[in-house]
Image: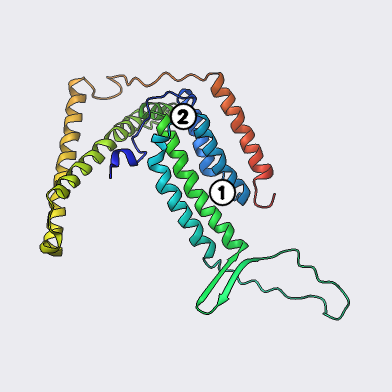
Amino acid sequence: MDLLRSLPIGLYLEQPVTWLHRLDPRVKLGWLLSFLLAPILASASWKLGLVVLLVLISLLAGIPWRALKPQMGWLLLFGGAIFVVGMFAPDSINVTQQVRSPADAGVEIVQPYQYVLFKIDGGIIHLKITKKSLDNAIYASTLIFTSIYSATVYLLTTSPEEVTAGLDRLMSPLRRWNVPVTEIMLTLTLSLRFIPLVLEEIQNLVRSVYTRAIDWQKLGLKNSAKVWLTVSEKILENLLSRAHQIAIAMQVRGFTTPNTHKVEWHQLKLGKADIFAMFVLCLFWVARFIVGGQFA
């Protein structure tokens, strides 16, 4: 398994440059937060609409399938499993329908609301789908999909430097209260750049263990644990060595503090496409409150 290609963290798609790449990172961050917050207390149709909208955005942006395929496969499988399990799971609500009018009163009883949608109760098989369990299944599966997939699209179309530059601009008012915004953003930049190195070290050492064709059954549980403990120590040693090399490289380039070494971020400037994207985002939230509520 290639960890560097299967995880979206630290994986930035440089080519092709889509219109999502050209958007301001602050605008894209607003859309990302909207996809994370909009499903809260929303109707089932709105949650499903978010999934469709998110997939349409990635398709219209022209993001290559090779970049989305490593995440889409296991994400759809995991989301589908959550949906099936949640659909048949007990909803912890015991609803009993009671006739309020006498049967011989000559009044036709109309049942406008059906709570139990599907039920199998025969032998050892007891399956039931209720409206509540279906809503829970839709909520859990769509929430997992939108949160992970939106973050994947954001990281694929936004470089780590742009992410930190946008956050630095948004957090700049905190400097009035002596919050070290630049130091925090620099740490975040180094962390995002360091994640692929961590994955690379883990991947190389795990592959080196498997290529030796170790007979784990003959080693036993205790000796196998010793092998993986040695591998973990080697991973930690290599990562500390990489971090030390990065620190030396920064010192050689004269970086001590932001006061003596100016940190150059991306020059952020809102364009026409960014203004249009913010206008659509406002319409998105208007639609969310008007037609996307649970009781709308």
Indicate left or right for 4 with 211 as reference. right
2 and 1 marks in contact (CB < 8 Å): no
Residue 151: x, y in percent? 44, 39
Q: Going 41% across and 24% down the picture, which residue do you hit?
A: 16
Q: Going 53% across and 30% down the picture, which residue do you hit?
A: 60
- Residues 175 and 12: in front is 12
Between tags 2 and 1, which lies in front? Answer: 1
Q: Which residue is mark 2?
A: 170
2 or 1: tag closer to the N-terminus: 1
Residue 196: x, y in percent? 28, 36
* Amino acid marked by disc 2: Leu
* Amino acid marked by disc 1: Ile
Q: Secondary structure at mark 1?
A: loop
How many neighbours does mark 1 have within 10 angstroms: few (below 14), some (14-19), or many (20 or more)? some
- Residues 28 and 211: in front is 211
Name the quadrant of the N terminus. top left
Q: CA distance from mark 2 to mark 1?
A: 24 Å
* Position of 268 relative to 280 (above/below): above
Q: Quadrant of residue 56?
A: top right
Q: Secondary structure at mark 2?
A: helix
Color theme of the render? rainbow
Residue 143: x, y in percent? 50, 49
Q: Going 50% across and 44% down the picture, which residue do you hit?
A: 146
Indicate left or right for 208 with 124 as reference. left
Q: Which residue is mark 1?
A: 40
